[in-house]
Image (cartoon, grey):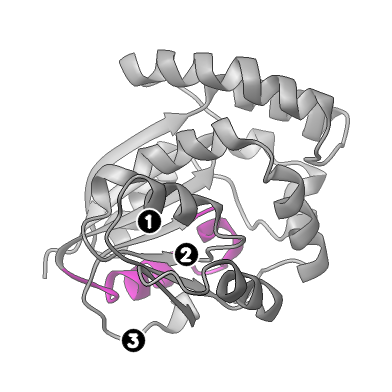
Amino acid sequence: MAGIAEPAYQHRVLESLASAQNYIAWLASLARPYLGDDPLEVGAGAGDYAAAWLADGLAHITLSELDPHLLGELRTRFEGEERVTVRELDVTGAPEGSHSAVVAYNVLEHIEDHVAALRSAQRLVRRGGAIVMLVPAFEFAMSRFDHDIGHHRRYTKHTLGGAYHDAGIELEHLAYVNAPGLLAWVVAMKWFKREPGEGALLRAWDSFVVPLARRVEALKSPPFGQSLLAVGRRTT
């Protein structure tokens, strides 16, 4: 997939964030209402979101990766789990499919032609199926880490909504997520040029800030956030 960063760097980041269980559970919960009975996750990484969906009772999910290392890790992690299918897939050249939804977390920003990728992703779902994307928000938050990890862009509601429109996807839901996370990102990643990493700070953030933010944002969507969630539907 064009635009993806050095694999070893991505693996290290994924491993460092695996301990943020409250954060993973929160983000997983955002897509859960739209997954249906047979979704496909593009760029499933270490499989942490899939594990959360399965624990919540998801009947079946297909996990896809291009990275050979992560593909192998997914097959090992879910070996013997009858509700999981693992496959290699490039979303930029996806075949026709009949999944109930396609979901991709922190994938679209890695792809140079994101409109073409959304059109391709739409082909993976049946009519009425959901196209669920979680992406990093706001160009002003673009950091050295974003560039190092292979991000082409960060998004606003206007730019992501426009990409869905140009791809011919009917937009159903568009919301910023994790308002305090955006402020922390700008300070830590942009100003101090750090990168995500496991440690006491991450554990404290996950234990205290994330649960509070989740409760508040469940009541009212914030006007800004570290991430942006979009849900659209295939109509043809």
158 relative position to 11: left or right: left
Quadrant of the rendered image containing residue 124: bottom left
Q: Are marks 2 and 1 in contact (CB under 8 Å)?
A: yes
In primary-sequence order, the first of circles 3 and 2 is 3
Q: The C terminus is located in which quarter?
A: bottom left
Q: Which residue is mark 2?
A: 114
Quadrant of the rendered image containing residue 115: bottom left
Q: Amino acid at mark 1?
A: Ala
Q: Is residue 129 above or below residue 206?
A: below
Q: Position of residue 57 (x, y in %)?
A: 30, 50
Q: Residue at the location (49% across, 37% down)?
A: 25
Q: Are marks 3 and 2 in contact (CB under 8 Å)?
A: no
Can residue 11 be seen in this snapshot? yes
Given residues 147 and 202, the one toward you in this image is: 202
Q: Which residue is mark 1?
A: 163
Q: Residue at the location (38% across, 56% down)?
A: 163
